Image (cartoon, rainbow, N blue to C red):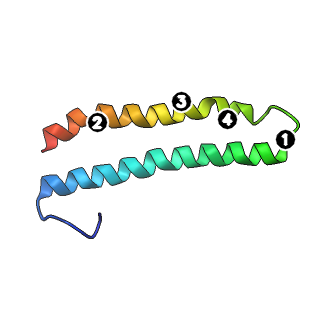
Amino acid sequence: LLKSRSGIRKTDSVVNYFIRCAIQTGSLATIWAAAELITWFKFRNTAIYSIFQTTVGLIYTHALYQTLLSRARLREQL
């Protein structure tokens, strides 16, 4: 996406926004899932990993909400 620019400033700014949002939400979800996996391997006989397991749904829900709420802003830019 970074290399295929349209030359239209508004469209390029929307593409940049999509890339930034994907990296931000994806990195948070990745870190959270990695923390869950690490605690599951390290403390398998305890329930410490369930802290991450029960809240990972909230992380994905937050990513969905951010996408839905950003639609109005993106419409204004175009």
Task: Tell me which numbered mark, 1 or 4, is placed earlier along the sequence.
Answer: 1
Q: CA distance from mark 1 to mark 2?
A: 39 Å
Q: Identify the disc placed on residue 44.
A: 1
Q: Identify the disc placed on residue 52.
A: 4
Q: Residue at x 43, y 37 (%)?
A: 63
Quadrant the N terminus occupies = bottom left
Q: Residue at x 71, y 47 (%)?
A: 37
Task: Tell me which numbered mark, 3 or 2, is placed earlier along the sequence.
Answer: 3
Q: CA distance from mark 3 to mark 4?
A: 10 Å
Instruction: Report the amino acid beneath label 1.
Output: Arg
Q: Is residue 30 above or below residue 54?
A: below
Q: Residues within 10 Å of mark 1 (few under 14, many from 20)?
A: few
Task: Tell me which numbered mark, 3 or 4, is placed earlier along the sequence.
Answer: 4
User: Which element is circle 4 on?
Assistant: helix
Number of on-image labels:
4
Task: Tell me which numbered mark, 1 or 2, is placed earlier along the sequence.
Answer: 1
Instruction: Report the amino acid beneath label 4.
Output: Phe
Q: CA distance from mark 3 to mark 2?
A: 18 Å
Q: Residue at x 48, y 48 (%)?
A: 26
Asked whether the residues under the numbered discs 3 and 1 touch, taking CB atoms below 8 Å apart as contact, a structural biologist would say no
Tell me the residue that label 2 is attached to: 70
Q: Residue at x 29, y 65 (%)?
A: 2
In this view, the residue farthest toward the right is 45
Instruction: Report the amino acid beneath label 3.
Output: Leu
Q: Is residue 15 left or right of residue 64?
A: left
Mark nearest the camera among 1 and 2 is 1
Tell me the residue that label 3 is attached to: 58
Q: CA distance from mark 1 to mark 4?
A: 13 Å
Asked whether the residues under the numbered discs 1 and 4 touch, taking CB atoms below 8 Å apart as contact, a structural biologist would say no
Asked whether the residues under the numbered discs 3 and 4 touch, taking CB atoms below 8 Å apart as contact, a structural biologist would say no
Q: Is residue 43 left or right of residue 11?
A: right
Q: CA distance from mark 3 to mark 1?
A: 23 Å
